[in-house]
Amino acid sequence: MKNSRHSMPQVNAGSMADIAFLLLIFFLVTAMIPKDKGINRKLPTPCPYGEICDTQINKRNMLEVHVNSNNELFVENEIVKIENLKALAIEFLDNNGDKSCNYCNGKNLNASSDNPKEAVISLKNDSQTSYDFYIQIQDELTKAYYELRSNYATTKFKKSVNALTKAELLEVREAYPFILSEAELK
């Protein structure tokens, strides 16, 4: 006769793997995975093989924006507060130095850009620049373009940017093209 006191009851673990798998599937289906955030930019097309794609840009048509490892912002080699970057960008982009832009409201300075279609903002940052500061700079530059485009839409079409048709929106973007270079300066 067997002694029932010394025998241990066995737990059937055969279906444990099935239960864990079902819980994993349930979690994957019901969990909200946040969308990645990033900067919405259209990259230029690659240079075709055998062609030279370097373009010569007149020095006055380039606004040089530098950020060092201490998150200090330099515009044309002068320290600037980030709150002033949007106004400086607008002044540079809307300058109308060559007087070919009939919709520009700039001061026609000889030291600034010829017109918005020729103006390039060159952004250079140190590898130790904080990501948050870099995003703030991108936001300020985007706000500058948005304000110029919004003013153009209001003046030309008597509409807000959100109420424009596709053709009108294309014209606004052509009037103030977003030209931002993060390439190394030569």
Image (cartoon, grey):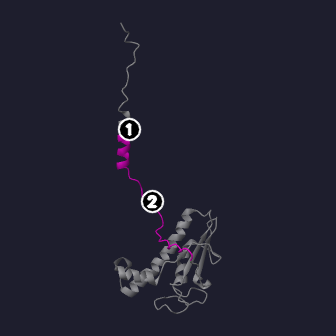
**Residue 23 placement (x, y as % from top left):** 36, 41
The reply, left or right, for residue 111 in relation to residue 100 is right
From the image, which quarter does the C terminus lie in? Answer: bottom right
From the image, which quarter does the N terminus lie in? Answer: top left
Q: Which comes before the other along the chain, label 2 or label 1?
A: 1
Residue receiving disc 2? 36
**Residue 63 placement (x, y as % from top left):** 59, 79
Q: In this view, does 11 lie above or below 135?
A: above
Tally the marks.
2
Compare residues 109 and 36 and report the one nearer the observer: 36
Gap between marks 2 and 1 measured at Cα: 28 Å
The kind of residue tagged 1 is: Ala
Q: Which of the 4 image quarters holds residue 137?
A: bottom right
The kind of residue tagged 2 is: Asp
Q: Report the disc number at residue 20.
A: 1
| Dot 1 alpha-carbon crowd within 10 angstroms: few under 14, some 14 to 19, many 20 or more | few
Q: What element carries label 2?
A: loop
**Residue 139 placement (x, y as % from top left):** 50, 70
* Residue at x 48%, y 74% (from the top left corner): 143
Q: Report the disc number at residue 180.
A: none
Mostly what secondary structure, the magenta segment?
loop
* Residue at x 38%, y 22% (from the top left corner): 10
Nearer mark to the viewer, of 2 and 1:
1
Compare residues 11 and 46 and report the one nearer the observer: 46
Q: Which residue is situated farthest in the top direction here?
A: 1
Q: Is residue 14 above or below residue 85?
A: above
Q: What range of the chain is rendered magenta?
A: 21-50
